[in-house]
């Protein structure tokens, strides 16, 4: 299957008609599978993916279970708003042309899906350019579901941001359905059921009226139970969507309360008390600080000058002491001279002269100097003590300033939080709204459980009827057990069951190996310890480590989940033998650079014969564009016009012209 052309008319952000050529081109003899779309967020990349899915899958593109009314409302939302503003009766249209080999014949098909607000859609099919008017909308959709089964379509046309859900899905619903369809198990199941119907029909022809009547009653009860079980299950599924929406709204309300600091508001009185304590502490600190500053603290602001002053005063003190010593010594020299002469005779004079020279030299060195600052000894001692106290005061001021800064910071933080805290009425309204949402959720949940219990009860009734029918039909088989046709059918059923079992084992083994091969291409070196194990009965796909231990997929990083899912998709695609295009929106959004490089080089060029990528400029950037360029058939850029509020598609890419000029 190859998409040839996509035509959009008044669809989502596209006003008017856009013709988009999707046919992959060749560079000489080399096939280039990638068609690249570039656009900024909101330009319309997702609209391309949505159009392809909607064109092929119809309402199954929206949900597995959706009412006609909701589907019509969804379609109405897809009509371009500008077109609706110009003409309320405007319609939207999607036309997708593709080639497909059906029943061994290669043909070109063109489907057109159109609709107006709140009206039934119209779906038409053309084959090799000729409209097929014999098919109704339902019949065309049935053909499209045969071409692209919904369970498989989800694995080939997807949003890269949501692909991690495939790895996280605890139910494994998407992968189970895809595996069964791709293995052909659904066909074998239908064949087995058809054989059962043949046996039942053959047995009923030879049965007595009483047995036939019992079979008729049991079949009727089984059919009614099945219908009711499906009805209640469908209603429960619809409520399941409501529960999910309510949970999202509850989460949003809880975040809103958190943003309004509801927890803090509960303790608002205590906060005000703490605020008053801090204000009192701040006032005490400021008083202490003022007291310190009013003392000798200023002397500590000029430590160099104060040290120079002390040094000068100390020098002056020495000069004054020397002068005082000189005066005192001079007053006693005559007495000393007389004493030495009377004691030492002639030697006394010589001793006196020697002492006079010694003390005279000392005294003269100091006596020649004059003090610069003539203060008393008491004033000097006082000033020295004040300077020392100034140093102590400075240390105290620094400590007080630190405490004051801490108090002020806490005050600022507390003031902001008190200001942010909502008043009691606002908070009460938020909590009342939350309680109401929780009440609605609980009510819907109880209704959901009730419907599921009803569905389960009718399912059990259906199973009981099936057992009764099995016994009745077993009795019928005895009536015609000698019939060769019957024996052959029974033998065929037995062989079919054995074939199905062996086929599953073989294909599951092949799928596991294909997954390992794909994962090794895409994963980082340190992640190669992972592999896949598929349950042959439930078809659940588990990720296992090198020791064979099942790994919780939710514990993986976002990038690891995407790589896991991409590997599963590639393995399923190769196993199926189907050739479907791969369409990926935001393919690299949650991956690191290493995983991105692996996908660009090893996945996209080989994912299919046609790969349509819808990327932003930060995903497939210049480097990745150059790496992907040999496989790019052609590229488009989607431009959004702010004035017209609509988008247009032109051929080219963000950096394509620059790269071509460089080449």
Image (cartoon, helix red, strand yellow):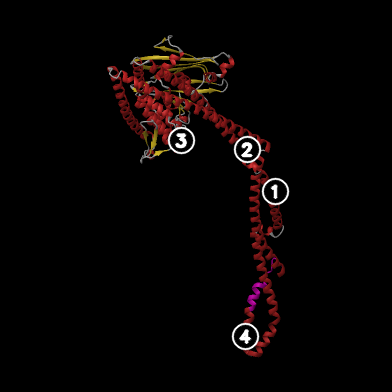
Image quarter in which the C terminus is found: top left
Residue 269 is drawn in which quadrant?
A: top right
Q: Alpha-carbon distance for marks 1 and 3?
A: 48 Å
Q: Quadrant of residue 195?
A: top left
For the residue carrying disc 4, how many other residues have a C-alpha within 10 Å: few (<14), some (14-19), or many (20+)?
some
Q: Nearer the viewer, mark 4 or mark 2?
A: 2
Which quadrant holds the N terminus? top left
Say which element carries label 1.
helix
Q: Are marks 2 and 3 in contact (CB under 8 Å)?
A: no
> Please, is residue 456 above or below residue 259 in the view?
above
Looking at the image, is 418 positioned above or below residue 37?
A: below
Give the image location of residue 413, x and y in percent.
Answer: 64, 45
Question: Residue at horizontal 64%, vertical 62%?
Answer: 307
Q: Nearer the viewer, mark 4 or mark 1?
A: 1
For marks 2 and 3 on the same chain, the one whose residue lies earlier in the sequence:
2
Secondary structure of the residue carrying tag 2 is loop
Q: Which mark is residue 260?
A: 2
Q: Earlier in the sequence, mark 4 or mark 1?
A: 1
Pinpoint residue 475: horizontal percent, then vertical percent.
34, 21
Marks 4/2: CA–CA distance: 103 Å
């Amino acid at each position: 299957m190859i998409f040839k052309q996509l035509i959009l008319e008044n669809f989502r952000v596209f006003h008017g008609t856009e013709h988009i050529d999707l046919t992959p081109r060749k560079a000489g003899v080399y096939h280039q599978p990638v068609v690249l779309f570039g656009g900024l967020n909101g330009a319309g990349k997702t609209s391309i993916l949505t159009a392809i899915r909607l064109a092929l899958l119809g309402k199954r593109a929206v949900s597995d279970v959706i009412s006609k009314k909701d589907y019509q409302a969804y379609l109405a939302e897809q009509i371009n708003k500008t077109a609706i503003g110009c003409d309320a009766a405007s319609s939207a249209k999607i036309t997708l042309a593709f080639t497909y080999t059906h029943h061994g014949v290669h043909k070109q098909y063109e489907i057109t899906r159109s609709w107006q607000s709140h009206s039934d859609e119209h779906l038409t099919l053309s084959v090799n350019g000729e409209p097929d008017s014999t098919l109704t909308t339902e019949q065309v959709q049935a053909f499209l579901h045969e071409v692209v089964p919904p369970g498989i379509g989800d694995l080939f046309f997807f949003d890269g941001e949501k692909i991690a859900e495939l790895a996280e899905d605890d139910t494994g619903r998407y992968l189970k359905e895809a595996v069964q369809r791709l293995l052909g198990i659904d066909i074998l199941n239908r064949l087995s059921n058809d054989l059962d119907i043949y046996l039942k029909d053959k047995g009923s022809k030879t049965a007595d009226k009483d047995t036939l009547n019992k079979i008729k009653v049991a079949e009727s009860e089984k059919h009614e139970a099945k219908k009711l079980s499906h009805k209640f299950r469908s209603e429960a599924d619809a409520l399941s969507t409501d529960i999910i929406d309510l949970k999202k709204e509850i989460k949003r309300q809880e975040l809103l309360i958190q943003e309004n600091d509801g927890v803090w508001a509960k303790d608002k009185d205590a906060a005000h008390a703490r605020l008053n304590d801090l204000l009192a502490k701040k006032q005490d600190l400021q008083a202490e600080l003022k007291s310190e500053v009013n003392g000798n603290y200023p002397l500590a602001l000029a430590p160099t000058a104060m040290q120079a002053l002390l040094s000068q005063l100390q020098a002056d003190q020495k000069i004054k002491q020397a002068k005082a010593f000189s005066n005192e010594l001079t007053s006693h020299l005559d007495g000393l001279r007389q004493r030495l002469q009377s004691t030492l005779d002639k030697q006394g004079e010589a001793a006196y002269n020697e002492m006079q020279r010694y003390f005279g030299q000392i005294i003269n060195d100091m006596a020649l100097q004059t003090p610069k600052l003539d203060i008393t000894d008491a004033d000097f001692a006082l000033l020295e003590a004040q300077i020392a106290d100034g140093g102590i005061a400075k240390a105290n001021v620094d400590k007080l300033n630190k405490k004051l800064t801490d108090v002020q910071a806490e005050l600022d933080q507390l003031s902001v939080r008190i200001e942010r805290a909502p008043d009691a009425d606002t908070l009460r309204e938020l909590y009342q709204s939350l309680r109401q949402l929780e009440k609605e959720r609980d009510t819907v949940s109880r209704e959901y459980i009730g419907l599921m219990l009803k569905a389960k009860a009718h399912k059990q009734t259906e199973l009981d009827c099936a057992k009764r029918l099995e016994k009745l039909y077993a009795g019928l088989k005895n009536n015609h057990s000698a019939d060769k046709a019957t024996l052959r059918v029974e033998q065929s059923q037995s062989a079919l069951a054995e074939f199905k079992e062996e086929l599953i084992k073989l294909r599951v083994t092949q799928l596991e190996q294909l997954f390992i091969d794909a994962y090794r291409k895409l994963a980082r070196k340190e992640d190669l310890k992972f592999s896949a194990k598929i349950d042959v009965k439930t078809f659940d796909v588990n990720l296992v480590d090198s020791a064979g231990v099942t790994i919780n997929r939710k514990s993986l990083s976002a990038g690891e989940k995407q790589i896991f899912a991409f590997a599963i998709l590639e393995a399923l695609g190769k196993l199926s033998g189907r050739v479907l295009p791969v369409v990926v929106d935001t393919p690299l959004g949650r991956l690191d650079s290493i995983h991105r490089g692996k996908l660009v080089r090893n996945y996209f060029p080989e994912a299919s014969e046609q790969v349509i990528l819808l990327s932003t400029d930060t995903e497939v950037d210049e480097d990745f564009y150059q790496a992907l360029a040999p496989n790019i058939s052609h590229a488009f850029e989607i431009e959004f016009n702010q004035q017209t509020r609509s988008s247009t598609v032109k051929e080219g890419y963000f950096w394509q012209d620059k790269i071509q000029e460089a080449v």
